[in-house]
Amino acid sequence: MLKDKLEGLTFLVTGGAGFIGSNLVEYLINHNAKKVIVLDNLSTGFEENIKPYLSLSNFTFINGDICNIIDCHKACEGVDYVFHQAALGSVPRSIQNPIATHNVNATGFLNMLIAARDAKVKRVVYASSSSVYGDSKILPKVEHQIGRQLSPYAVSKMTNELYGEIFAKTYNMEIIGLRYFNIFGPRQNPKGEYAAAIPLFINALLNNQSPAINGDGEQTRDFTFVANAVQANMKAMFAENVNTQGDIYNIAVGERVSLNQLVSTLQKLIGTSFQPLYKAERPGDVRDSLADITKAKNNLNYNPEIKIEEGLKQTLQWFISYTH
């Protein structure tokens, strides 16, 4: 059904050369979208991620920046739907450089909303983050109960949600936000000081090194395979009879594992016994994270089909193929 819907439509994916964005691009191309446009400045994304599509007649890459409103307007020309994935991720990065995080995540998002409004885009689906729950101790996390944010990154994503709701109501736009919970999978970058836990752990174990864990490893996360996030984006974009006035949905699996359990599973899958190296806790990190995904299931018909172990197997296969 979705395949038929995509054939006559033009999509913009901001951050489309990045991890989640490029997985979305792959889905759109494989399901015969009329046209897919990527806006990315390649600061955290890679041209390699979209290389297979560069020669296709229905694909356009704009090497531009969401911080530049002219680039945003150019990218939105003739676009039906926008998937906004562009962002500067990482809590530690935001603590070290809050201005850069704000410029990209908050001002860049505002630029995209203005460009989408002016281009009369039908709907915007954007990436928010579970970090907005902050210091709330309530588990599982339910959309309407948040705490105080613990990092500039979390504040920037909370700002997205506020702007999303205001723009939807003020300008009669259709806007839906997805609170991602620890998305992982193929094309997630294992390099650099701000890399996420799973690619770092995999990289270490494949290279016969001890994976580094900040804290005691008993902190828990609702790790979510990227195919589930792609499914959520597609269903949010085409959901009917839902509140598109800036509504927010948790996108996760609804199960949590500790970092120690995660490393143990990876050790078994890889066949290694290198033990973790424990370091100091990081400021701004949330202790426990678990999503209530009832709202996304009921309203979007979201169904996370790939659980963590299967997701780790697929991620491992990709890492072995592409990095070794």
Image (tube, rainbow, N blue to C red):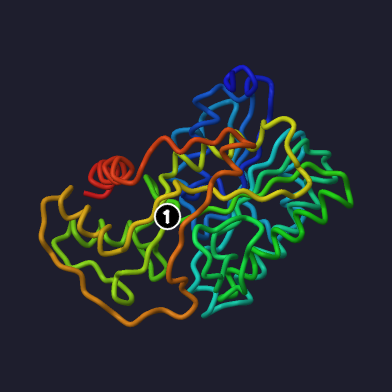
Front-most of residues 85 and 48: 85
**Mark 1 crowd level (few <14, some 14–19, many ≥20, 10 Å Cα):** many
Query: What residue sits 78% from the left and 38% below the top?
Result: 121
| Residue situated in front as seen by the camera: 8 or 177 | 177
Quadrant for residue 226, please give it: top left
Residue drawn at point x = 61 percent, y = 44 percent: 295
Which quadrant holds the N terminus? top right
Residue 243 lies, with reference to residue 53, above or below; the image says below
Which residue is at 56% across, 44% downward? Answer: 294
**Which secondary structure lies at badge 1?**
loop
Which picture quadrant has residue 273?
bottom left
Please provide percent x and percent y for residue 76: 74, 42
For disc 1, the marked residue is 222
The one nearer the camera, 170 or 97, is 170
In this orientation, which residue lies closer to the viewer: 303 or 52?
303
* Left or right placement of residue 63 versus residue 161 in this view: left
Task: Give how far across and how far down residue 82 sits, in percent.
Answer: 68, 41
Residue occupying the point 77% across, 52% down: 113
In the image, residue 264 above or below residue 300: below
- Total labels drawn: 1
Residue 205 located left or right of residue 149: left
Q: Is 184 left, or right, of 10 in this rendering?
A: left
Q: Amino acid at mark 1?
A: Asp
Q: Position of residue 103 (x, y in %)?
A: 67, 68
Tell me which corner region of the image, top left, top right, bottom left or bottom right, holds residue 78. Answer: top right
